[in-house]
């Protein structure tokens, strides 16, 4: 068997592999070379531990197929694999080359069973999946294409060679048009490509087509309220609607509510395209409504981009695209609001509000830790988005005080 299309002969050696071994630290980066390399401490922790080591990578020319296969594997790995297995996110990429990332997983199996091998064997039947195994030899480790039946003839030993950290975390390389869309057309195309497998896509596209003609702009001020779940958006937007005699809209809009669950269960590519299109429908509503009254919007593009970026970027906050990255720019074809306010509360107060609402009662420690990282990344991404940037509002005081603070800001910035 030849190496799969994603790792063409020769190309493999120009690629860097990254394993998210410890979410609080840099990924472990390595390249491959034909001569043995002594692995130092950090690498020994990953490759030197007892157990069988594998990595698998998903690549396809068809991005819908690629996204779905990756999601299926992620699900299978979390539901099937035993407790004696560690699974880390892994990727392979060409430094600074956008869209070069081939995503996958690194598996360390310390069990005495063949569960992971059985699973890998099933997965590699899929032509989009490539599986490597890793073998140790003293202080060295090499990678080879894995096959359950003895040796693969064409397989060439490639030694693991420690590499320096990449300038841009690999998960930032594929964000454009996979997690965040910077024009309606790009998001539209994704749903067009999945009408066969997700019939609801056609209905969503129809709603988008119907709404677009009404978009205009230039009227009363448009004020967006953003923030994490339970920061008080619903409470504040309702109060503003009353006090300003404003129209209250949200993104995704009500007409997409019945499709949300369906798209929420899809991989990021499809899910994010759905939310992106929701913004364009809301924009059309804003255009119409702002001719009559001020408009308050509960979540809009900041939410779409910040959550998408925070989910796409694994590990720590430092892995986010840099402050000046174009990934934080507002899409050129999306109606801009006059003011965007980001509600923030400290994590303890937010948890208290979530609990009062009857959610998150039994959050496990590990999940809390992950949530903590995720929350930090969403908030940081919110703050980095530009044109328009958001103004931060401390939403810890009472609802009445938060309302007064916001009314004051609106008077100053929008002369309302
Ligand atoms: N300023 C506030 N002080 C205390 N509790 C608040 C405040 N604003 C909202 N809450 C409460 O916190 C919970 C979450 O508020 P909600 O407006 O639903 O947030 P979101 O829409 O951002 O998810 C609700 O139970 C709400 O009553
Ligand atoms: N404009 C929007 C609104 C929500 N979303 C997504 O919807 C999720 C937040 O939804 P939620 O149910 O917590 O929202 P609220 O109930 O807090 O309004 C996030 O995962 C976002 O990815 C989005 O992408 N774009």
Image (cartoon, grey):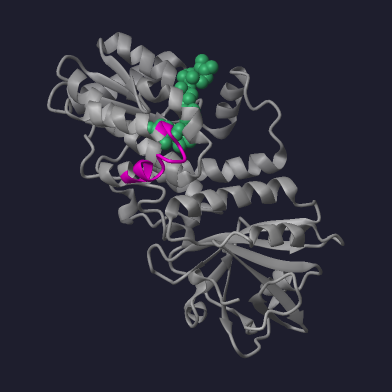
Q: Position of residue 223 (x, y in %)?
A: 27, 26
Q: Is residue 38 visible?
A: yes
Q: Which quadrant of the structure image shows residue 354? A: top right
Vertical comparison of 103 with 6: above or below:
above
Image height of 28 relative to 204, above or below = below
Task: Give the quadrant of residue 300.
Answer: top left
Which residue is more in the foreground, 348 or 241?
A: 241
Question: Between 396 and 383, which is closer to the camera in this rendering?
Answer: 383
38 sits to left or right of 4: right
Taking the spot 38% from the left edge, 28% from the top edge, the residue there is: 252
Residue 258 drawn at (x, y percent): 45, 22
What are the residue bounds of the magenta stretch? 189-200
- Locate residue 368 relative to residue 382 in the image: left or right: right
At x 39% / y 35%, what residue is drawn? 201
Q: Residue 343: percent from the left, percent from the top? A: 41, 29
Task: Give the number of callouts.
Answer: 0
Q: Residue furthest left?
A: 218
Residue 391 shown left or right of residue 221 in the figure: right
Please give the name of the residue rendered at 45% of the width and 37% of the height, measured from the top-left corner: 198
């Amino acid at each position: 068997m030849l190496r799969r299309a994603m790792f063409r002969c020769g190309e493999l050696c120009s690629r860097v592999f990254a394993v998210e071994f410890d979410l609080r630290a840099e990924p472990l980066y390595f390249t491959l070379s034909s001569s043995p390399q002594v692995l130092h401490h950090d690498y020994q922790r990953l490759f030197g531990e007892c157990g069988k080591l594998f990595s698998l990578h998903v690549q396809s020319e068809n991005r819908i197929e690629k996204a779905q296969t990756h999601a299926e594997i992620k699900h299978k790995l979390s539901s099937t694999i035993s407790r004696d297995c560690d699974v880390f996110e892994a990727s392979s990429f060409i430094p600074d080359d956008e869209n070069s990332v081939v995503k996958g997983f690194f598996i360390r199996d310390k069990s005495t069973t063949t569960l992971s091998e059985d699973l890998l064997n099933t997965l590699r039947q899929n032509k989009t999946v490539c599986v490597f195994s890793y073998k140790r030899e003293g202080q060295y480790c090499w990678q080879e294409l894995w096959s359950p039946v003895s040796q693969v003839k064409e397989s060439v030993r490639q030694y693991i060679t420690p590499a320096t950290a990449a300038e841009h975390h690999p998960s930032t390389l594929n964000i454009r048009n996979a997690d965040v869309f910077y024009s309606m057309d790009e998001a539209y195309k994704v749903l067009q490509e999945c009408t066969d497998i997700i019939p609801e896509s056609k209905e969503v596209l129809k709603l988008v087509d119907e709404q677009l003609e009404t978009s205009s702009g230039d009227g009363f001020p448009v004020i967006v309220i953003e923030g994490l779940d339970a920061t008080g958006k619903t409470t504040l937007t309702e109060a503003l609607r009353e006090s300003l005699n404003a129209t209250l809209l949200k993104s995704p809009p009500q007409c997409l509510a019945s499709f949300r669950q369906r798209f929420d269960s899809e991989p990021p590519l499809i899910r994010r395209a759905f939310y992106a299109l929701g913004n364009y429908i809301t924009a059309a509503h804003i255009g119409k409504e702002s001719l009559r009254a001020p408009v308050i919007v509960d979540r809009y593009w900041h939410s779409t981009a910040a959550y998408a970026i925070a989910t796409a970027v694994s590990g720590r906050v430092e892995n986010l695209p840099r402050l000046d990255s174009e990934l934080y720019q507002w899409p050129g074809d999306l109606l801009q609001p006059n003011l965007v306010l980001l509600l923030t509360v400290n994590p303890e107060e937010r948890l208290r509000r979530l609990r009062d609402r009857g959610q998150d009662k039994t959050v496990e420690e590990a999940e809390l830790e992950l949530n903590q990282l995720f929350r930090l990344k969403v908030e940081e991404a919110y703050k980095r988005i530009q044109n328009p940037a958001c103004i931060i509002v401390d939403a810890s005081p009472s609802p009445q005080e938060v309302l007064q603070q916001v009314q004051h800001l609106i008077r100053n910035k929008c002369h309302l």
